[in-house]
Image: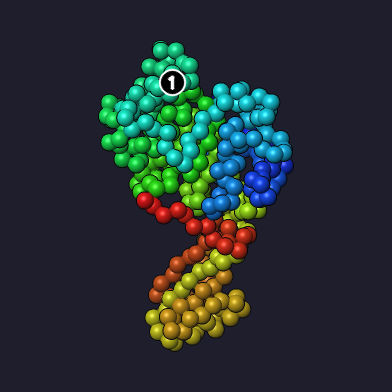
């Protein structure tokens, strides 16, 4: 595995333009070894362009990039030996079986026969593909194909893997199964650079998150750090009758809540911590106010993105 004396990946002032269109406008990133780093952004924000550069598939116009201690521009072959890539579109050959796809990948990586056999068996087991190893990939479900695709990208034993929107088009169950695979990778010390439009995905998986909008990083931090930057957290309360609702509105007049008389609801600004909820309920109990229903809304990464960019992210439709 990569030594932990330096980050797995760093970029400094990275830029890329296509004609007059500036796609990446000076990207600065640092990704720690053995972590999941998620890059979020809507279509057209520059995510795939950045991954192509980091995977040595495209050259930046300017800036510095180091991958696992190697200069990306001057040592691309050394970088390629240490990374794996799973793109938006599957690299699986439908004519071949799962095992044959893995063996072919091993031959393309110039591995010897013994290592190919060992890694094929190990990856089939690791990704729960042993039972379907001898079936043609054309018969696989979307989730199985994605797992095989990811297994193929690990055939060379990479220390860093790029996953470019790996769960787009998967059903919810397949998506969560792939999340478990990604979590096992980092438990084994592999660094994962993940691009996604799914806010929940980044929230579940990522140690750190960066938000990309119009080619620029607009925010970076842990999911919890970013969510604390977004407004909109509140406690929503529903009451059984007009009298209870009116009393509650008077009781929280100092907190600038939002009241809906028709629905008999009340929203009180809050970060959702247990102490704040308890204090609010204790206040109502002292005033003999009965709450019929209570829900807590904590800002999520979608709220963060909207707060920082002025528009929400919109996941691609599921096929």
Q: Residue at x 44, y 87 (%)?
A: 243
Q: Residue at x 43, y 15 (%)?
A: 115
* Image vertical order of residue 257 relative to residue 47, above or below: below
What's the coloring here?
Answer: rainbow
Which residue ends up furthest to the bottom in the rendered image?
243
Label 1 packing within 10 angstroms: few (<14), some (14-19), many (20+): many
Percent coordinates x, y for residue 163 in the rendering: 50, 38
Position of 203 with respect to 293 (left or right) is: right
Question: Which is more toward the observer, 247 or 71?
Answer: 71
Question: Which is more toward the observer, 23 or 98?
Answer: 23
Q: Residue at x 30, y 35 (%)?
A: 138
Exactly how many numbered labels are in the figure?
1
Percent coordinates x, y for residue 316 in the rendering: 45, 53
Describe the element under mark 1 as helix, strand or loop: helix
Percent coordinates x, y for residue 199 in the rendering: 50, 53
Q: Quadrant of residue 176?
A: top left
If the image is split into quadrants, where does the N terminus sit? top right
Question: Which is more toward the observer, 24 or 266?
Answer: 24
Percent coordinates x, y for residue 180 in the rendering: 42, 39
Position of 218 with respect to 178 (left or right) is: right
Q: Does the image show residue 111? A: yes
The residue identified by callout 1 is 106
Q: Residue at x 60, y 41 (%)?
A: 50
* Image vertical order of residue 138 relative to residue 297, above or below: above
Q: Does the image show residue 222? A: no
Position of 291 with respect to 207 (left or right) is: left
């Amino acid at each position: 595995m990569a030594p932990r004396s330096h980050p797995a990946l760093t970029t400094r002032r990275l830029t890329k333009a296509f004609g007059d269109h500036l796609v990446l406008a000076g990207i600065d990133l640092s990704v720690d070894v053995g972590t999941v780093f998620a890059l979020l952004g809507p279509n057209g924000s520059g995510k795939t362009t950045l991954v192509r550069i980091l995977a040595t598939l495209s050259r930046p116009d300017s800036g510095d990039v180091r991958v696992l201690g190697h200069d990306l521009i001057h040592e691309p072959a050394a970088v390629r030996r240490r990374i794996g890539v799973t793109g938006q579109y599957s690299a699986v050959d439908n004519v071949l079986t799962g095992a044959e796809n893995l063996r072919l990948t091993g031959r393309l990586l110039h591995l010897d026969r013994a290592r190919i056999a060992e890694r094929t068996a190990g990856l089939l087991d690791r990704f729960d593909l042993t039972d379907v190893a001898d079936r043609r990939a054309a018969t696989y479900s979307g989730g199985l194909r994605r797992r095989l695709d990811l297994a193929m990208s690990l055939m060379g034993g990479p220390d860093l893997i790029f996953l470019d929107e790996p769960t787009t088009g998967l059903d919810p169950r397949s998506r969560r199964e792939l999340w478990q695979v990604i979590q096992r990778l980092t438990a084994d010390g592999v660094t994962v650079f993940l691009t996604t439009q799914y806010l929940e995905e980044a929230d579940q998986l990522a140690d750190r998150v960066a938000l990309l909008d119009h080619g620029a990083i607009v925010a970076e931090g842990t999911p919890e750090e970013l969510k604390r930057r977004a407004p909109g957290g509140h406690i929503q309360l529903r009451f059984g009758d007009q009298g209870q609702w009116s009393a509650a509105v008077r009781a929280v007049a100092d907190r600038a809540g939002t009241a809906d008389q028709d629905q008999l609801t009340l929203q009180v600004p809050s970060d959702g911590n247990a102490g704040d909820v308890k204090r609010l309920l204790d206040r109502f109990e002292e005033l003999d106010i009965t709450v019929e229903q209570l829900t807590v809304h904590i800002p999520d990464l979608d709220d963060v993105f909207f707060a920082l960019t002025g528009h929400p992210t919109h996941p691609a439709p599921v096929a």
